[in-house]
Amino acid sequence: MTTEEKFDAIVVGAGPAGSACAYVLAREGKSVLLIERGASSGSKNVTGGRIYTYALEMVEPGLYERAPLQRKVVREQMMLLGRNGAATLDYVDYDFGEGVPQSYTILRAPFDEWFASEAEGQGALVATGILVDGLIEENGKIVGIKAGEDEMYADIVIAADGVNSFIAQKAGLFGDISAKTVSVGIKEIIELPENIIETRFNLRGNEGAARLAIGCTAGISGGAFLYTNKESISLGIVFNPEQAGKSGKRIHQILQDFKMHPAILTLIEGGTTVEYGAHLVPEVGLTGVPQKLYRDGLIVVGDAAGFVINTGTIIRGIDLAIVSGLAAANAVLKASEPSQIGRLYMQELQNLLLLPTMKVFAGWHNILGIPRMVKEYPDLVNEAMNFMFTVDGKVPEKMPKAMLSIIKKHVSFFQLVTDGWTGLRSI
């Protein structure tokens, strides 16, 4: 195509960020090309599978009602795994499922395909199976993209191509990612009958549960998740690749050991694995967001920009991706000339509360990075619970003395104080 035939915007990556951006721009009459390198939108995406509905509502009120969602989450669960036991905190709040439910579990492939088709329905041109392998630059400005021998032009290119963004690197905004700033996520989807899922997770109808776990990654910094879908469970582990490499642990074996833990096996027993995948995940929150998210002619959104929050109790990525895509679209719509888009994008990230939200949780990754969080503290809690509930006919130790003995067995007083101070400073 020629520069005279250019699009208003080219969006690279048809995940939640890219589709949200393309949806809004096309709805407002802009000519948009949404490019996906997978055979279909969502075919290359891996995630735990949860979306907070406020983000879809920001794109368009009622949009969530058209989405292929699974179960509305009313049960929030935290699990600390020991050698042969587990301490589980189960919080249920049925208000989470009222009105516009707070969050739903999702399966990424059908969700992403749906969202891209919604953008197409608004007028965006969706092109799948296309690998963008270069950018077109004129006089210091990005003016288009290259895909093989094809060249396509636009006023703005939006990089929504995920963590370790090739487009952002080609634009010179940032280099290769560091192993310290990401985790490896490995996920399986395990099919189970609907009634079994509801019985095992204490659910009714279309209610869902979201469970996070620590103490399951062989001493490597990380954790695990289980999300209940209608007729399947999304199960996976997320851990630091640098530590995993040094430990010599086989990635598949860590996942298999987690699945075989008695407290997990009872939840998935009899199920059939129908999907398996791995993916890099941004892990250090605001610390991992590059200092520069735009240059003339290009802006970066979603995972590519590092927009992920992990507090240990809540993992957020899809909602932030959608909000960042909306921020990008708003910036394009508000700009009177293309050179203003980058600055307006940063303003929109503030206006839509994405950056302020990330700032609130900016230090939480330091808590999750405490080495003893993944082994010593889960073991300590499990041993303490074991003492509290053991009845064997013997005279037990007095509670204060026994608890002090258990604590000393797992951590020193200095480690306890140091970790407490790290946690206090982080929040």
Image: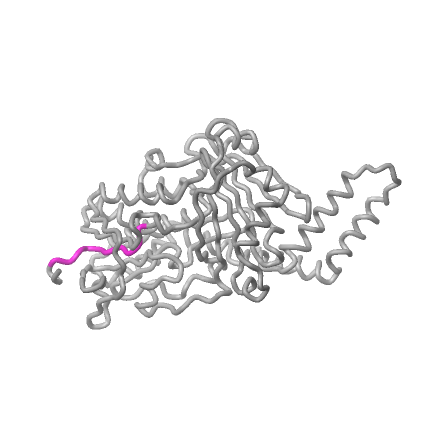
Q: How many discs mark residues in the rendered view? A: 0
| Horizontal arrangement in the rendering, residue 152 relative to residue 93 (left or right) | left
Q: Nearer the viewer, residue 214 or 303?
A: 214
Residue 122 image position (x, y, % from top left): 22, 42
The residue range painted magenta reads 5-14
Examine the residues drawn in magenta and state their main secondary structure: strand
- Which quadrant of the rendered structure holds the N terminus? bottom left
- Which quadrant of the rendered structure holds the C terminus? bottom right
Quadrant of res 65: top left
| Residue 175 included in the magenta stretch of the image | no
| Residue 9 included in the magenta stretch of the image | yes
Residue 355 image position (x, y, % from top left): 42, 55
Q: Nearer the viewer, residue 94 or 13?
A: 13
| Horizontal arrangement in the rendering, residue 167 relative to residue 136 (left or right) | right
Above or below, 159 relative to 236: below
Q: Is residue 426 visible?
A: no
Above or below, 385 relative to 287: above
Q: Residue at x 40, y 66 (%)?
A: 291
Q: Residue at x 50, y 31 (%)?
A: 95
Residue 157 image position (x, y, % from top left): 25, 59
Q: Is residue 367 visible?
A: yes
Q: Residue at x 76, y 53 (%)?
A: 407
Quadrant of res 305: bottom left
Q: Residue at x 57, y 66 (%)?
A: 246
Residue sticking out furthest to the right: 395
Quadrant of res 136: bottom left
| Horizontal arrangement in the rendering, residue 287 relative to residue 154 (left or right) | right
Q: Nearer the viewer, residue 139 or 46?
A: 46
| Horizontal arrangement in the rendering, residue 178 relative to residue 20 (left or right) | right
